[in-house]
Each structure stands twice: as C-alpha cells, then as structure tokens.
Image (cartoon, helix red, strand yellow):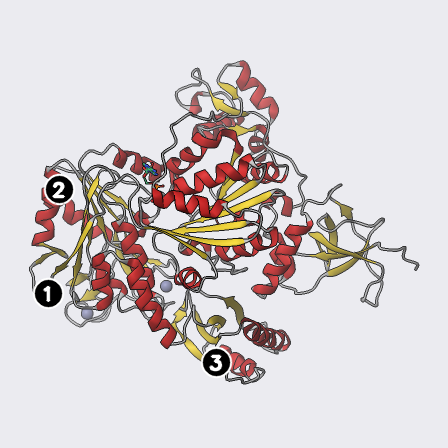
Amino acid sequence: MEVTAASIVRVALPGPLRTLFDYRAQAPLLPGTRVQVEFGKRTLVGVVMDCVDESEHTGPLKGVLEVLDRAPVLAPPLLDLMRRVSEYYLHPLGDTVAHALPVLLRRGEPLRTAHQSTWQLSAHAPESPDDAPGTRQRQALHLLAEHPDGLTSTELAQSGISSATLRSLRSRDWIQATPRRRFEIQHTPTFTLTGEQNDAVQSILSDTASFRCHLLEGVTGSGKTEVYLQVIRNIVDAGRQVLVLIPEIGLTPQTLGRFRERFGDDVGVSHSGFTDLQRLSAWVACQRGERRILIGTRSAVFTPLPDLGLIVVDEEHDSSFKQEEGLRYCARDVAIMRAQAAGCPVILGSATPAFESLNNALRRRYRHHRMLHRATGSAAPTSRLLDIRGRHLDEGLSDELIRLIAQHLERGHQVLVFLNRRGFAPILMCHQCGWTASCARCDARFTLHREPPALICHHCDARRGIPSACPDCGGDELDALGLGTQRTEQTLSRLFPGYPVIRIDRDTMRSRKRFEHALAQVHSEAPMILLGTQMLAKGHHFPGVTLVAVVNVDAGLFSADFRGPEHMAQIVLQVAGRAGRASHPGEVVLQTHHPEHPTVAALATGDYHGFALRALEERRLARFPPHAHMAILRAEAQSLSRPMEFLNQLKQHLEPSPALEIMGPLPSPMQRKAGRHRCQLVLLSRSRPLLHQSLQRLLDAAQDHESRRQVHWSIDVDPLDTF
Ligand code: ADP
Ligand code: ZN
Ligand code: ZN
C-alpha cells in the first residue's frame, strides 16, 4: 500500500511501554495533537510526537481512529520539556506526556472551560432537601447543599442531574445561577521594601531575559512573599506569565488572598481539591494567556504558559514537590529545567532550603539572596533547650514546660505544641510478656488510635480492633507506650481545662473545609492551645502564637535515613518560625534528652544556615547527595529471594568505574511493607552522565529479564526517601 508523504504519526501512549507507536493518518498532523487509536484490544488516547515519511515498523500500520484536536493542545516547548523529563527520570514517554494533560483531556474530551455559570441553592430552598418532590430533585438539592460554592450544569450532568430537573428547581425558585466570581484588585498600600528585600528584588529584576536560578533564603517573616509579589508585578507588566508553585497544603485562603488583592482576575489556581473541569478550565485559561499568573501544587509545573517569564517555587525544600509513585519527579527540579528551556529566571524561596539548593548557591551555580531580619521589625523568637534528663514528666511534658504554657495562656496568648506523631501511642505492649501489636504485612508496629478506637498501621493503613487481652499470654494489662497527638491532646485538656485545644493532624484534617475552619478559629487570636504534626509547619501565619513547644526534638536524631537531620531541622525551624510574628516577641522551647548533641544544639540557636554548612560537610565526607548524585532501583515481590536475585543479576550489567559507587542490592530498611518484600540497589556518582548511562544499562537489562513480570520494580532518580 502506498503511503503519502509525512502521514505516519508517532504517538505517545499512556502505559508502561517505552516506545512510540506508529499509525497512519489521513493527513499530516502537528506534534501535540491528540488522537484516538486502537492498541491491542483497547482504544487509547495518545499524543502525536512526530510526523514522519516512513515507519521503521515493518508490518502494516493501523490507521488513526479519530483526530481529537484541530490544533495541537501541547505546544513544542512543552513537548520538549516532557521529553526531557522522561529521559531524566527514565520514565516511559507516553506516561510522562500524560502528566501534561488534565484528566479530561487524557480521556479524550474536547477542550472546554467552565465559563458557564454555576448553580447554588437559593434562600427559598427547602430546609431539608428531602422535602422536595421526586428523587432527582432531592438528589440535586443534596448535591448543591454539599457544594455551597456552586456546581456547573456539566458537573451536575455528570452526577446524573438533567437540565430538565434544573429547570423545574429554577421555576420553584429553589436554586439560582451565580455568575463566575470576579476578584477585584484592592488598592492596599504596598510596603516600602526593607533593604534586604530591595536588594533581592533589584538583583532578580536586573536580568529577566535569560535563565538564572535564584535562591531566596530568608528567615520566616523576612517578607519573601512580598519579594515574589514585586518581582511578579514587573514580569506581568512586561506582558509575560508567571508560574508559582506551592507545597501541597500551602495554598491557604491567606496566600491566595494576597495574590488576588494585587492581581485580581489575572490569578489562576490549580489544586488537587478542584474538580476535573475546574482544573481543565484553569489549564485552558493559562494556555490562552487569559491568566497571567498560575498558582498551583506539584503538577501545575506542567501547565502550558506560552509567555512564561518567571517561575517561583515557594518553600522549595518541601517534600510534597516530589511525586513518590509512577513518574517520580520533583516539581522544583522540573521547574528549573523549564525555566532553562524558556530562558527565564526561577526563584526558589525558603527559610530552610534543601541542601541541594543551598549547595548550588554556595557553589555559585545559583544567585544567593539572604534575608536575615523580619520585615515587620518584630524580634526573632528566642529559642532554648529544655534539658529533661531525669526530670519528672507528665505524659511527656516537663513541669517547666507546663508552667510556661500556663504563663502564655494567662497573658491571653496562644501556644503551639508540636509533636510529629499522630494517633494515641505508637506502641501497644503486654505488661506480662512483652508482646507488641505489629502489622502482619509490614515490618512495623501498629499505632494505637483512640478516636475512633483502632490499631492502625501507618505504612499500609491496615486496621484492627484493639484486643482486650494479650493474644500471646492472655494477660489483660496492655500498655500504651509513647506519645501521639491524641494522647497529648488529652493531657493538655486535663492540664488546661479553661482553654480550647485544637488538634491539627492528618486524622482531624481529612477535609479541607475542616482545616480552614480550624485555621479561622486560630486566627480569632483568643488564647488557646494549638497542637499538631508537621501540618502546622507549612506556610501558615499564626500571629497570636507566642510560645512554640517542641515536645520531643530528639525524634529525628536516630533516623536511618541520611536526610533525617536535615528534615528534622527544617520542620523544627519552620514550626519555630510561626511564633511571635506580631508585636509580641516569641519564645521557642525544645525538650530534649540530648542537649549536647550538635544537631540539637544547632537547632536551639535557630541558625539553620550554620547547621546546614556543618551537615553539608558531613555529607561531603560520606560522599552522599548533594556531593554525589543518587538513584535507587527498587524491586519487590511476595518473597525476598526473587527481587534480590533480580537486582543481583541486573547489577552484573553495570560497568565498574571508580566514579560509580554501587551499594547493594540490600533489603530495604523497612523490608516488608504491605505484604511485599522490598530491596534496593543504590547508585552514587559525581557524574550525572555516568549515573544515567548506568541506569540505562540497568533499565535495558530489566526489560529483558525473565522475572520482569513477577517482580515489581521502579527507578527513582534523586530519591528523597531511601526506605
Ligand atoms: P515570609 O514569606 O518570608 O515568611 P511574608 O512575606 O509572609 O514573609 O511577610 C511576613 C509579614 O511581614 C507579613 O505580615 C507581611 O505583610 C509583612 N511585610 C512584608 N514585607 C514588609 C515590609 N517591607 N514592611 C512591612 N511589613 C512587611
Ligand atoms: Zn502477653
Ligand atoms: Zn502495615
């Protein structure tokens, strides 16, 4: 059969296969166009990556079933970025490209936006939706009651509510159409920048026409956001677009408010809490240039922004920028690749930068801006260690800490108590025989929860009832050992009965609404105790808090992970930074059994930078990242022997080199998780090309390996987690 010129398309398809697939098209198609094709017995949506004259494929080619777009939905720069990401993380191109598309486009739906108005309950709606006649109407009223911000007719249709139902509800005056919300720009006075802020802004603006990476290392309250806002103003006024990446739970109404005040409707938002249609709308608006600024979490880094002129990564050290499954990318690092390709600056901001970023700044690969003072002029909190060796503790709280908490509450202030473990207690143990409740599927103990009562494995989420007697010896004295937030909540409520205790952890904050409600309560600034895990450490301002207490600062000291101290320092200093933002000076106390330990001592001074310099030196001596690049090949299966053998065989394909350090294969520190046995092969090299060559060899060998289907394996480049 004769094939006309350039009518063979090379298509990226979602899935584990690492090649493009050739199909015949009626006419040449531009890269970035979506097509529907038959693949095996399935119909898939793919993206055209290339259009060629001849296929390398020998057999007859199938034809494209349908061309889904008249114009490409992904422009060449974004396709190039996805290629680069796919190569860097050694992840299949088809699956990588799918990350650049909102869910609805991946499913083959047309480009469209939620520009339609939304429906809401009106003031005349019946008290209870069940008072409405007809199941459909009741269902519609229930849905709308659950979505006070309104739903579009498309969203309602997806839930089975027809336009006829909406019409009849409308005729009863029970629902109303609300126009799309508009955000007015408020003429709030902009601050006069502090000297430090001004230096940073001027330096960043001195060259916005080429790629440059800036590390903005500023203590909490130094006014980093104000620096972003003023730089953004300039970029937007010059007609370019800006991408702002924030951590998973960093997008508070406060943060968004600050952007909307300055930029009104120019600000688009992309967040995992949105519906698919809302995400598509934000995506389309950015692609068309209708939004000049996009604020979003991790995956927003792949949003099309044709006039991209700046990327900001706020709290760049945050681990939520790393995706820990499938395409294991780090949005901060992809942001840097993207800025480089776009020829624009990127700002990484943090009070506690990741060692990788700090190291790059110290080696002058990044421009380094330090802000050491709070912008409001309020004093930095004073920190000190509370040596609790041999002291009396009431459920983990020393007498001195209890006295301090009372003092701050009595003065009408708020207290923040930090404990990085949820649940009631991490161990349930039999006093008679020493039995402990352990998860059958993981090498881990169950955590005891009291609300609701259960034993929960924090690694695989397995749940059990709490036994009333020891399953081994029948003894009935089961002790809860150690502290979790539920237990400390109980203790604090008993010790300070006159004050509310608000617990913020993953269990109490399952819903966003609830989280926001809790934050609102805290912002009333009435005296209260705020107790929580690291959810408290992220970007929130708690102006009423004057005392921050870290119950157990030693927790991160004995971590098996080489990043343990770094992460502990980041969390502790982020939490400490919440104190005393307003006019009252803050106080930070850290309870410890190891006051002389250098890491702990450094935390007490609040000097992250100094701590980091020392810790970086230790990493250099150990030849660990950032002084070498790391990658992990993980493998898991029902038994340990098979994945170990698998990795051992793959390892034979590596070419030994003095510049390549190979560790393992070894069982993972947590060998059994969710019923699978896990092991890993770690590669370290100072040479990125050598590391990638070696990974490519492993990958090729893995794909040809006979047990590739019995072993679940994955590659993690620049891993954050070495478990
Ligand atoms: P960071 O992001 O570094 O923690 P923020 O940008 O949130 O700091 O600023 C901390 C506080 O200081 C905010 O309340 C902000 O409104 C205020 N602020 C920022 N810049 C200035 C300035 N130049 N003068 C006075 N107040 C400022
Ligand atoms: Zn027992
Ligand atoms: Zn488990």
Is residue 422 shown to the viewer in this render? no
Is residue 41 shown to the viewer in this render? yes
Question: Circle 1 sits on which residue?
Answer: 389
Label 3, label 1: how far apart the Cα atoms are: 41 Å
Q: Nearer the viewer, residue 65 or 554?
A: 554
Quadrant of image for the N terminus: bottom right
Left or right side of 219 for 16: right
Question: What SS does tag 1 mark?
Answer: loop
Q: Looking at the image, which residue is at 67% across and 47% down?
A: 74
Label 2, label 3: how far apart the Cα atoms are: 53 Å
Question: Circle 2 sits on which residue?
Answer: 408
Q: 271 above or below 635?
A: above
Question: Circle 3 sits on which residue?
Answer: 662
Report crowding for label 3: few under 14, some 14 to 19, many 20 or more residues within 10 A (C-alpha). Answer: some
Left or right side of 360 for 402: left
Q: Amino acid at mark 1?
A: Arg
Report crowding for label 2: few under 14, some 14 to 19, many 20 or more residues within 10 A (C-alpha). Answer: some
Question: What SS does tag 3 mark?
Answer: strand
Q: 456 above or below 693?
A: above
Q: Which of the two discs, 2 and 3, labels the residue nearer the N terminus?
A: 2
Q: Which of the two discs, 1 and 2, labels the residue nearer the N terminus?
A: 1
Indicate the position of residue 115 as horizontal and vertical percent values: 59, 29
Q: Amino acid at mark 2?
A: His
Report crowding for label 1: few under 14, some 14 to 19, many 20 or more residues within 10 A (C-alpha). Answer: few
Indicate the position of residue 107 as horizontal and vertical percent values: 64, 46
Q: Nearer the viewer, residue 615 or 43?
A: 615
Q: Which of the two discs, 3 and 1, labels the residue nearer the N terminus?
A: 1
Q: Which mark is residue 518?
A: none
Assign ligand 3 to one image quadrant: bottom left
1 and 2 marks in contact (CB < 8 Å): no
Quadrant of image for the C terminus: bottom left
Q: 623 above or below 206?
A: below
